[in-house]
Amino acid sequence: MMPTLPFKIFVVEDNEWYGELLVHRLGQNPNHSVHRFATAKACLEQLGEQPDFITLDYSLPDAKGEQVLRQIKERLPGVEVLVISGQEDVGTAVSMLRQGAYDYLVKDENTLDRLWNIVGKVEQQARLRRENNQLRRQIGARYGAGQPILGEHPTMQHVQTLIAKAARTTITVSVSGETGTGKELVAKAIHFQSSRATLPFVAVNMAAIPRELVESELFGHEKGAFTGAVARRVGRLEEANGGTLFLDEIADLDLSLQAKLLRVLQEREVTRVGGNQAIAFDVRLIVATHRDLLAEVQAGRFREDLYYRLLGLPIALPPLRQRGADVLLLAEVFVRDFCYQNNLPPRQLTDDARERLRAHPFPGNVRELKAVVELATVLADGDLIDGDDLPLRAGRATTIGPGSQLSLREQTTAIVQSCLDEMDGDVLAVAARLHIGKSTIYRMIQQQELRVS
């Protein structure tokens, strides 16, 4: 449990009696640190103390509310400012709100109660934001840059050690593990902990590209190289030059292209489709697959020479069911992040929910866990997520209503559709919120899994 930090409030009020009344009311919460200022100048001089909330008297002896609000927002754009005025003026209220005021209150018999409710909401939002930032700083210090890979289990500690070793060199890395275990996160962690962190990270899912387009995708093409090639296209190897190229589901690469990829990697230069100029490149290569690549070699579906060229440093990710209490660590982080991103009050897992999560095998691994707890967060009534809110049954994600069954894919689709509806079909905004690729959303729309109003 993170320590509760004081919620710092500045009361800017020149009327001594009313100012002390505000200080007394707000100070009834022991977690509030309340400071009163009688002038705008005195308040502005102390903004370096980083207040969390400011109540601002519209009419001060040395400045008008618009001037003070503008200066506060210029120096502390994230602080919430509530304007309190002795007169009701719609024009002034609208003007202050447009300048960034949280709200505009007129002094009357209900002002203190309304103020108390507003401060409660702002404090809750600030605490959640502060806890998330603190959590992310702790995770960043421990797990490095990029999206963190969480885990206390010894197998994940070993993965962290291998990531750190890989990041110190440019050795090729091959990541293996079941679907949903976080193979791309490992690739990003290596990239962002390496000396190439400020250079491109380019991810390509080989399974998602039509076979006839893979060569163009990787190597690029010249204008007129084939029907539909209306302009020159830079391939992913060129795009990643200087940085890291991540080839996911490498086992899906067609045998005929495996030979071409091997030659390109050995020569460290690429020729675009339809071109004749060899273009040198420098990339750090990371590959991943959920299959046993050696078994693919033995079955004749993957070239042995390419296998040994790609093997490099192998990193095997364990399935979630073998990671013990990590499931609860991840679930709590997913709940916290989802609440924060959707402006929901913080929610906690009950003991029953935690027991059910520990007992579930999660065939979809971390990806399934994330979908399950996010949906449970939406379904929960109040601040507690109970076991019945978790859509789990017989080893797969299931019920959200009587007699209904939802697969992991259907749950994910439901969450994406909900965000699309909420954000008026803004695919880029939804992709950023849910941390998924925009191409994934566009593909789901094209396949009519999602609808855009």
Image: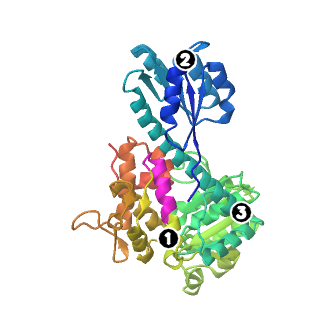
How is the protein colored in the picture? rainbow
Front position in the image: 195 or 79? 79
What residue sits 69% from the left and 25% below the top?
A: 45
Q: Earlier in the sequence, mark 3 or mark 1?
A: 3
Instruction: Assess whether residue 341 is covered by the magenta stretch.
Output: yes
Image location of residue 59, percent across then percent down: 53, 14
Q: Quadrant of the N terminus?
A: bottom right
Q: Amino acid at mark 2?
A: Glu
The secondary structure type at the circle numbered 1 is helix
Q: Which residues are magenta?
A: 331-345
The secondary structure type at the circle numbered 2 is helix
Q: Earlier in the sequence, mark 1 or mark 2?
A: 2
- Binning the other alpha carbons within 10 Å of mark 3 as few (below 14), some (14 to 19) or many (20 upward) gives some
Which of labels 1 and 2 is toward the front? 2
* Residue located beneath label 1 in the image: 327
Front position in the image: 344 or 281? 344
Q: Amino acid at mark 1?
A: Val
Residue 263 lies left or right of residue 394; in this view the side is: right
What residue sits 61% from the left and 54% below the top?
A: 136
Q: Quadrant of the C terminus?
A: top left
Picture disc at residue 244: none
